[in-house]
Image (tube, rainbow, N blue to C red):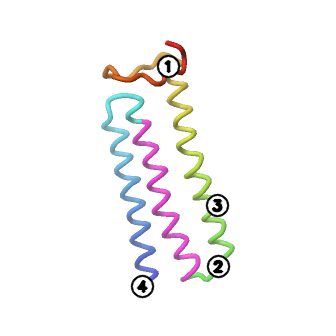
Amino acid sequence: MAVRIISDILIAIGAIFALAGTIGILKMPDTYSRMQASTCVATLGVLGVTLGALLYAVFVMGSAAIAIKVAVIGLLILVTNPIGSHMLAKGAYKAGIRPEKKMDVDDLGRDFDE
């Protein structure tokens, strides 16, 4: 019973992060800020949901096979999402999309010899 409550709390925390990230996507002023908010949705939201699903699969359902599948899916999302977001930011910069405010340090410009 206690594991079920903890699992539900972790899933709710993941859902709250997803909601906060979605609101961030709607409220942020430029492409790069919105990209950061969407990365938080997938990374932190999936982390909470994955941990909750792992606890549920192992202790409530008693299924190691489902737990392994959930862990692999969560790990893949946690590894690939930041990399994909970084590549999207570089592609947007190369396409000429610049942040709304002037940056003090322009690391992407350095990468493209600008």
Question: At 42% from the left edge and 39% from the top edge, which residue is drawn?
Answer: 36
Reading the image, the residue beneath label 4 is: 2
When the figure is inspected, residue 26 is found, relative to residue 50, above or below; the finding is above
Question: At 54% from the left edge and 21% from the top edge, which residue is drawn?
Answer: 111
Question: At 53% from the left edge and 19% from the top edge, which residue is drawn?
Answer: 94
C-alpha distance separating marks 1 and 2: 50 Å
Disc 3: CA contacts within 10 A as few (<14), some (14-19) or many (>=20): few
Reading the image, the residue beneath label 2 is: 63
Q: Amino acid at mark 1?
A: Arg
Q: Amino acid at mark 3?
A: Val
Disc 4: CA contacts within 10 A as few (<14), some (14-19) or many (>=20): few
Reading the image, the residue beneath label 3 is: 72
Whether pointer 4 and pointer 2 mark residues with C-beta atoms closer than 8 Å, the reply is no
Q: Amino acid at mark 4?
A: Ala
When the figure is inspected, residue 89 is found, relative to residue 93, above or below; the finding is below
C-alpha distance separating marks 2 and 3: 15 Å
> In this rendering, which labeled residue sits more in front, label 3 or label 1?
1
Say whether residue 57 is left or right of residue 42. Answer: right
